[in-house]
Structure formats: C-alpha cells, structure tokens
Amino acid sequence: MIELKSASELAGMRAAGRLVAETFAELESAIRPGVTLRELDSLATHYLKSRGAEPLYKGYRGNPPRHPPFPGVICASVNNEICHGLPDQRSLRAGDIVGIDIGLKYKGFCGDACVTYPVGVITPGARRLLTVAQECLHQGIAAARTGRHLSDIGAAIQECAESQGFSVVHEWGGHGIGRKLHQEPSVPHVGPAGHGPKLRAGMVFTIEPMINIGGAECKMLKDGWTVVTADGSLSAQFEHTLAITENGPEILSRL
C-alpha cells in the first residue's frame, strides 16, 4: 500500500526536508582536506540537536534486525564507497569525493537526502562523475509526474548515466518516506519504463541514484554497512525527497 500524504502531512514533510537542506549548508564549509569523517558527524549531531530534530541513522539496524547498528548520524562514503559509509576517524584528502547522507525526524516527519562533495581540487574524471550523477537525479525527478509509471524514473536515470558512459547501481534504490524512514514504494534506478504503479498526487519518496565510473557491480564490506564498487572505481550519489503533485514533482529536501 502506497500512502498518499494529506496537505498537512506534506507541510510537515516540507519542514523536515528543509531542515535536511539546512544541515547540508552547515556542513558544506567544513568539507575540506584534513577534516575527519567523525568531525563532520559531530557537526551534524550538534546541529540537529540544536534544531530539535532526531537523527534517524544512529543505531539503525536495517534488515534483518540482527544487522549491526549503524554507528553515526550521517553516512559518509568516500571515493569507491557507494553508500552507507561509516563516519569514522578517516581524514579526507585533496582529490577525494565524499557522499554525505543525512536522515532526520522533525516534529514527527522524516527527511532524507544525499550530496556528494569534491574535497579540494579533484580530477576531471571525478568532476564529470559528479556532474553526470547530479543530472541523473534531475532526470529521474523530471520523470516523476502523475500518470507515469514508477519505473519511468529509473529508465530516465539509466538512460542518462549510460549515455555518458557510466553505470547505475541496481541493488539499492529509493523508497517511500513519511512518518517512517522506509515505506512503500521501492523506487528502482533502472528501467525498463512502463512498469510498476502509476504515480499519484500525494506520493512522497526518495530518488537517490548511485552512479559508478566503472561497472555497476558492488559488494559489502565486513563492517556490514559499507557498500563499495566491485572494481574499485569511483561512485557518486545524489538524493532528494520529493512529493508528487498535480503540478509536477516538488523537491522537499532543498532550501
């Protein structure tokens, strides 16, 4: 069952999404060579506390419940890490890219987004990856319109990535979101188009494509969380939470 949000629920989700965007604005200036991932996690922790928001990732066990609890407030995925990287004591170096994923609950509603940042000066290839990954997200959002099928989003993302010589991770997708972080539907980032439920006003979900320079294959590290590219190539992720409206998609997780 895909939940359709009411006008008052959408207002709550706008506030949660806006707070996610504000947290990114707080972190952005700190993302530079020499900063540790734990320091970034601490900055996010203190900002969310100051705003009365609850972090969603810290202690999250995922599925199955015996999964090790996630240790941080943010996910911090560096270079070949696709998603769910741990915000540990590693220091960022010039030339790195780092994907920061933030999930929070504010006044009963969840917000979720991800941005991949350059650290100092990065290579032209890494810069192009970030550009294409952002464009993949924008193309997916553009396809999220009433009357279209859910898989049209993934088809648009896949076409955008592969036409530029990049690959899309298949195993991880977007998700419905509301009073809980994960709801129906599961949002694929690959096609074919024309499959799945038709999009209706009131649906709210994330689109969060993970784009690789090399192959699409991935593997999980022994920590039980960090997902990396199988071939060691760079990966970038961008994510927004959006609502389907009669006037087109509304991005909730931006200022």
Image: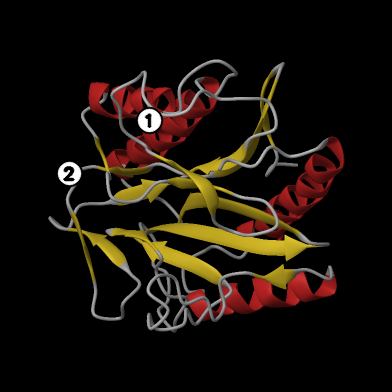
Q: Is residue 251 above or below residue 105?
A: above
Locate residue 228: give its quadrant.
Answer: bottom left
Residue under label 1, please give it. 154
In percent of width and height, residue 51 lies at 84, 68
Question: Quick one: 204 or 81, which is closer to the camera?
Answer: 204
**Residue 197 seen by the camera:** yes
Question: Quick one: 131 or 174, which is closer to the camera?
Answer: 174
Residue shown at the point (41%, 22%) measured from the top left? 152
Q: Is residue 145 above or below residue 86?
A: above
Q: Quick one: SS at disc 2?
A: loop
In percent of width and height, residue 24 lies at 65, 56
Disc 2 packing (10 Å; few <14; some 14–19; many ≥20):
some
Residue under label 2, please give it. 214
Locate residue 188: give its quadrant.
Answer: top left
Disc 1 packing (10 Å; few <14; some 14–19; many ≥20):
many
Q: CA distance from mark 2 to mark 1?
A: 19 Å
Locate residue 154: give its quadrant.
Answer: top left
Q: In the rendered image, which quarter contains the C terminus?
A: top right
